Amino acid sequence: MRAQEITFLKLVQGDKQFQVPLYQRTYSWGREQLQRLWEDIGELVDQHLAGEPAAPHFLGSVVLAPGQIQAGGVQRWLVVDGQQRLTTLMLAFTALRDHLKETEDARGGDRVHRQVLVNEFHEGADHYRLLPTQADRDAYTACVQSRADAGGGDNIGAAYRFFRGALAQGHEAGDERWAATVETVLKDLLSIVEITAEPGDNVYRIFESINNTGVGLSQSDLLRNYVFMLLPKRGERIYQELWLPMQQSLGPKNLELLVWLDLVVRGHYKTKQSEIYREQQKRLQPLAGDEDALQREIEQLAERAGRFLRIVEPAREQAPALRAILERLASWGGQTHYPLALHLLDLLAAGRTTADDAAQALGYVESYLVRRLICQTTTTGLNRIFMEAPKELETDRPAAEAVRRFLSGRRRRWPSDEELRAAVRAKPFYWSGRPAQRSYILRRLEESYRASEPVDFAKASLSVEHVLPQRPAPAWFDLLAEETEPNQTPQELHDLLVHTLGNLTLTGDNAKLSNHPFERKQQILDSSALRMNLEISSAQRWGKAQILERADRLAGRAAELWPGPIGGVKPTGEESPGWVELRSALVAMPSGTWTTYGDVAELIGSHPVPVGAYLGANTGVIGAYRVLTVEGRVSPSFRWAEGSDRPPPQELLASEGVRFDSFGRAHPSQRLSAAELATLLGRDVVQPSAHDPLPDGEDTAAAERFLAQLRENWPAAFKGVVAALEFWRRQGGHVTYGRHEETSCFPMLDLGTSHGPHLMWPVGIYPVSGTVEVVFQYLKTRSPFDDTEQRRELLNRLNKIDGIDLPEAKLELRPSFPVSVFAEHGDEICKVLDWFVGVAALDLAQRN
């Protein structure tokens, strides 16, 4: 084997084809890996535009084996390892090509196509520079060929759509050189080690050895080994006195995080965690031979470790005010604030600030994070903001003032009081951040009432409750009908209100509250110990007016709890974040799907009328043709951009796979709801879902509630559902239940492995709304259903049953079918469940 480090462009140039062998799994990169790569690319683009020297970014290795060369054909290479990054970069170039063409740079798009994506003078399979596995091939070639079905519901389509969205967003914020610079970075500043096998090498054995390696050394392990190699005389003593206690108190993960934070607070804020060892080695290399200086470095790191421990374990902090805010940030979760928090503790240790000043500074950090979450401000660049902070803070001001001025910078998007009030009234708060963060905000709002006997939240088991239910009974719609606007249905009004902060509270009585009428909820909430619930129970009714009135009261409390930026007003000339979110959502939609103006309005916290006006005034918005009326028709006011030669919207949607009836209405199964749009954007959309299975058996009370709700609402399907659940138990599974407004049911399978429990479930059954969700969104993270082909097979088997029509475009979502299918086809569903268990068991056997 031979190895060389080359750029991506040099790797793919020439009459070559990279074939992914059949023994490789399908393409599996998800949003997290794509986002990480794009952030690395973005940093190189920024450096290049700023005229800074940009070293090539190392992506890893690609292991290739020579394939057969046919007369007049291309040189084929088998991709033994590295297919994920190779496929990802090809999809990035495909998206870049299409972006260039749509931004009036057709020549640039053609250049990318010919240089990178295809072998220009070859036809058939030889035409493509990359040929993925059979399962991925059609989705990939659809992107390269710019077919209407490009960007489907599988992982290939999702990656293509991710890059389309990222490029569109970057284009709006960047200068005129931005797209060309992205092209330069992708071609010339991404470095890959090409490892080439020799003829006669056992390629499959190479693949096995690469993918069955043991656990490698961490970055902190490498640094430790390097440092103590430079301490031949004092190494053993320093290790026992300084390094080992630090390692034991922090643990491996936190030690590695500290070593990275040590670089960040020193000003090396562009260092990635994968580059810790290299950067620390570069910094310490001049000290080689000076054991006094190296000892001081380790002493400083050990001191910083003590300060870092106060961040991750706030009970160690002695100052009350500082301990309180550190505890609140720990409850908030995440590591975003760590660089700034550690810097402030460094200043405190050096006597350059006080504990109260540092506490106030961290209070502004909390305010910044909370306001951004409530206003659903994009998290793109948030980590970088906090990594830059230690270097950028003004040193001639008190720490709190310096932090507030820094975070108030125009490009750092600290929402004003005006934006906060508007978001509380209209944004779907229930889809913001993580569940723990939503509960945290509601808890802090409850604490702001300063009750004489406050609730002990550490002991209380509370969850978020919708006062107006997610799936309301008819009586609720009768109430909402009194407040609808012209041409607005009660369902549309419900969707705009239900997830807003004004309709949410905390309670330990979710199961009791369910979707009962408000009068029954009043009786339950009236006995609550929470002041916010007593306030709700005192209302005479619960509709639009009451939800908005409560939203305004909560917004006032939020503004006091979490102060805003200096000036406190929204900067003029800035576009509403909602329109940015709208464009991102439309780009994220898989081909073969559609949505409505109301769904988009619900997602961004707006109204269908301004959504329609915005799309009408901005005819170049990617994917605008996929937004239809609530009946599934193309809006009469829809227009392409002037000079466009695109076909009529219905014709284009049909070419993507959207089905229309004879009245021109799109098929409802292919519609994306606001919740599904939010899921595609990476939001943590909470649905009534399964909790951790009970170790000692199923929850009998919950089971009885589920069966009672099912019998009451869908009596014809009752027998079929019960039989299917009994069949599932006989296959070795068990059943667990949700604890939200509707007692949902989940047939669970616990495939324990040597690495711990491995839970999966094929469907969720909702006995009030009468839907059965097929949980592709969760299955895609669990073997063997992380393989797109296995999820597609599940979809195809279900679709053979009368009454089930799941669109392939929703292979990463949670499409549903009616629970009524169980009435006549329960046996057929059991056959699918039997197949599901068999596939999962076979995969477990192969992995063990």
Image (spheres, rainbow, N blue to C red):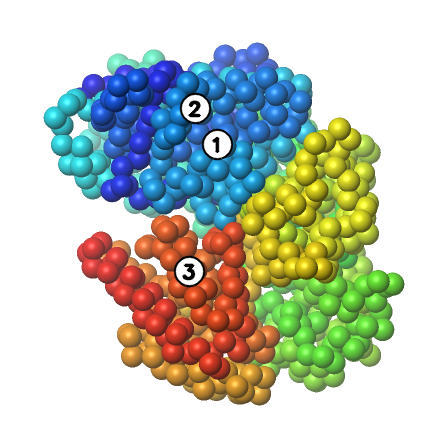
Residue at x 53% of width, y 43% of height = 149
Looking at numbered disc 2 in the image, what kind of residue is underneath it? Val
Residues under labels 3 and 1: Cα distance?
A: 26 Å
The crowd level at tag 2 (other Cα within 10 Å; few <14, some 14-19, many 20+) is many
The crowd level at tag 3 (other Cα within 10 Å; few <14, some 14-19, many 20+) is some
Looking at numbered disc 3 in the image, what kind of residue is underneath it? Asn
Whichever of callouts 3 and 1 sits on the residue coming sooner in the sequence is 1
Residue at x 78% of width, y 77% of height = 478
In this figure, which residue is indicated by the disc labeled 1?
A: 144
In this figure, which residue is indicated by the disc labeled 3?
A: 796
Asked if the residue at tag 1 contacts the one at tag 2, i.e. Cβ–Cβ closer than 8 Å, the answer is: yes
Residue at x 49% of width, y 54% of height = 808
Whichever of callouts 3 and 2 sits on the residue coming sooner in the sequence is 2
The crowd level at tag 1 (other Cα within 10 Å; few <14, some 14-19, many 20+) is many
Residue 521, position in %: x, y?
69, 80
State the residue in front, 310 or 496.
496
Disc sitting over residue 118 in the figure: 2
Whichever of callouts 2 and 1 sits on the residue coming sooner in the sequence is 2
Residue 219, position in %: x, y?
32, 32
Residue at x 68% of width, y 59% of height = 662
State the residue in front, 439 or 74.
74
